[in-house]
Amino acid sequence: MTTEDYIRFASALVLVLALMGILSIIVRKLNNGTGGFLAKSDRLSVIEQKMIDGKNKMVLIRRDTVEHLVILSPNGETIVETGIKSPKIVKSPKNKKDIPLEI
C-alpha cells in the first residue's frame, strides 16, 4: 500500500464520520427532545426517581393524568401502586401582598 492509499482511506473515514454526525444532529432536531422518533404526544413521563439501595430504584411514572409507582430491580419490576391521581398544581403567590393572613 502506498501513502496515497492511506490518505484516501483516512479521508473516506473522516467523510463517513462527518456524515454520521450531521445525521445525528438532524434526527435530534426532528425529535425536538421527545422520547421517540418524531413523537408528537407527551403522554408518558418519568416524574421522579429515587434510589432505594444500591440495586433497587423507585420510579413515579405519569401516563396521561394517572401516576404509577414502580420499583425496578435487577430481577424485574414490581408495581407498587397504580391509579394515583396527579396532584393539582397550586401557584405560589408572586409577592407577599397576595398571601392570605390567618387570624
Image (tube, helix red, strand yellow):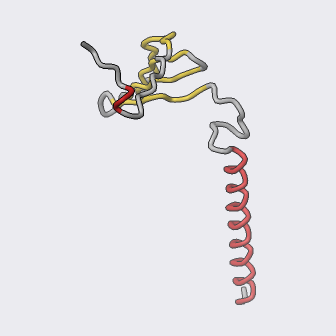
Q: How many marks?
A: 0
Q: Quadrant of the C terminus?
A: top left
Q: Is residue 41 left or right of residue 58?
A: right
Residue lying at the far left in this picture: please name it. 103
At which x and y percent is residue 34?
64, 39
Quadrant position of residue 60? top left
Quadrant position of residue 100? top left
At which x and y percent is residue 5?
74, 84
Q: Is residue 72 left or right of residue 22?
A: left
- Which of these two is toward me, 49 or 18? 49
Which residue corresponds to the image point at 36% horizontal and 28% vertical from the top-left?
56
Which residue corresponds to the image point at 63% horizontal and 37% vertical from the top-left?
35
Q: Is residue 29 left or right of residue 47?
A: right
Which residue corresponds to the image point at 48% horizontal and 12% vertical from the top-left?
84
Q: Quadrant of the N terminus?
A: bottom right
- Which of these two is toward me, 79 or 10? 79
Which residue corresponds to the image point at 41% horizontal and 29% vertical from the top-left?
93
Q: Is residue 88 above or below residue 54?
A: above
Residue lying at the far bottom in this picture: please name it. 3
At which x and y percent is residue 82?
49, 11
At which x and y percent is residue 96?
34, 31
Quadrant position of residue 10? bottom right
